[in-house]
């Protein structure tokens, strides 16, 4: 029987989605909310990426601009200076697919030319030129929901029906991407936890994740160390939210997520091994 499970061709590096996959976060930024400054030189970022692959990351997500509320905007030149050397070195020194976390078309093109095999866009390709740039690269694209802009999205997020509104947004972005020439097999969605949402909104979306499976594309979930997890646990320091992050991503996988975007790769890989061991238990035959 041929393998019918979906897979992504990330510029020649195949990411099989026969089981949940772990995307390790490499923020080459001075101000990311949970690890800003920890890896903001090329050497430190490359070393961190290699460590995450050692820990079991199935792919890496390289980011050069923090999206946390109030983060300083970064120019195209500065973002390229930060991410391109890291992508080049990681692509040369590891076999896993490399994703670029950017919404700028110029960075998308340059990152793929440098060896990235996936685009992760928190704006869902809404910036001028992003649809065409992503289509031209031919690599898979993550379309994420965000209400508002990073600078003020958390001021007072409001929805009449957060599930319906996020669903409608993603339907529209999937349509726009396909109209721009991006094949549906190269599209993924992300509910955008923490991007213009309260903790209640985030938990509602997590609880109803399965609602989005009907869109027919793999779902990515990114709750790692986020503020909502801190609110629910009382853990004010992002690095103290590992258990909460693992729990949230396990639930996301149980409710349909195929990729989880995490800072804490080793802990997440271990948790998913338990999940997969239980999933592997055959269903008893109905006699
Ligand atoms: N697809 C996707 N991409 C994302 N990029 C950044 C962040 C924010 O987290 P982080 O990168 O840790 O922080 P910062 O944006 O401050 O660098 N979250 C997501 C997410 O949930 N989904």
Image (spheres, rainbow, N blue to C red):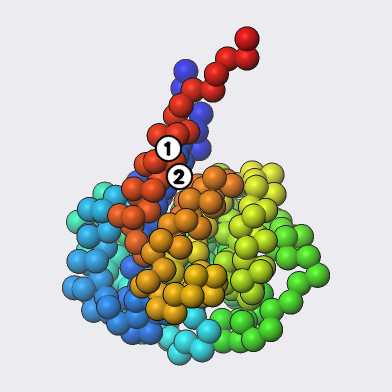
Q: Looking at the rendered structure, which numbered label has been put on residue 92?
A: none
Query: Depth check: 232 or 193 in front?
Result: 232
Residue 11 in view? no
Please provide percent x and percent y for residue 86: 27, 69
Q: Is mark 2 in CB contact (under 8 Å) with mark 1?
A: yes
Residue at 43% x, 57% y is 246
Mark with earlier residue (2, 1): 2
Please provide percent x and percent y for residue 224: 45, 65
Is the shortest distance between ligand 1 and the CB of mark 1 under 8 Å?
Answer: no
Helix, strand or loop for disc 2: loop
Is the shortest distance between ligand 1 and the CB of mark 2 under 8 Å?
Answer: no
Residue 71 appears left or right of 206: left
| Numbered label tally | 2
Q: Looking at the rendered structure, which numbered label has been put on residue 276?
A: 1
Question: On the image, numbered disc 2 is attached to which residue?
Answer: 20
Q: Nearer the viewer, mark 2 or mark 1?
A: 1
Residue at 31% x, 71% y is 84
Q: Residues within 10 Å of mark 2 (few under 14, many from 20)?
A: many
Residue at 40% x, 78% y is 237
Q: Is residue 85 above or below residue 52?
A: below
Helix, strand or loop for disc 1: helix
């Amino acid at each position: 029987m041929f393998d019918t499970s979906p897979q992504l061709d990330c510029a020649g590096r195949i990411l099989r989605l026969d089981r949940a996959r772990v995307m390790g976060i490499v923020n080459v930024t001075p101000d990311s909310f949970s690890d800003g400054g920890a890896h903001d030189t090329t050497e430190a970022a490359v070393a961190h990426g290699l460590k995450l692959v050692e820990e079991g990351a199935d792919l890496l997500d390289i980011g050069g601009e923090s999206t946390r509320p109030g983060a300083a905007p970064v120019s195209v030149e500065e973002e390229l200076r930060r991410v391109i050397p890291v992508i080049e070195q990681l692509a040369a020194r590891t076999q896993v697919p490399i994703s670029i976390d950017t919404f700028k078309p110029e960075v998308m093109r340059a990152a793929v030319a440098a060896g990235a095999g996936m685009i992760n866009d928190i704006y869902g390709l809404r910036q001028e030129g992003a649809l065409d740039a992503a289509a031209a690269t031919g690599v898979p694209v993550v379309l994420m929901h965000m209400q508002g802009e990073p600078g003020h999205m958390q001021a007072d997020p409001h929805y009449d029906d957060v599930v319906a509104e996020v669903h409608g947004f993603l339907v529209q972005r999937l349509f726009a991407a396909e109209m721009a020439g991006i094949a549906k097999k190269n599209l993924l969605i992300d509910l955008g936890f923490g991007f213009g949402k309260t903790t209640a909104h985030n938990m509602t979306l997590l609880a109803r994740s399965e609602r989005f499976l009907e869109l027919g594309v793999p779902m990515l979930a990114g709750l790692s160390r986020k503020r909502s997890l801190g609110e629910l646990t009382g853990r004010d320091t992002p690095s103290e939210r590992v258990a909460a992050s693992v729990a949230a991503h396990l639930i996301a996988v149980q409710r349909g997520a195929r990729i989880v975007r995490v800072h804490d790769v080793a802990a997440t890989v271990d948790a998913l091994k338990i999940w997969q061991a239980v999933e592997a238990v055959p269903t008893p035959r109905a006699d």
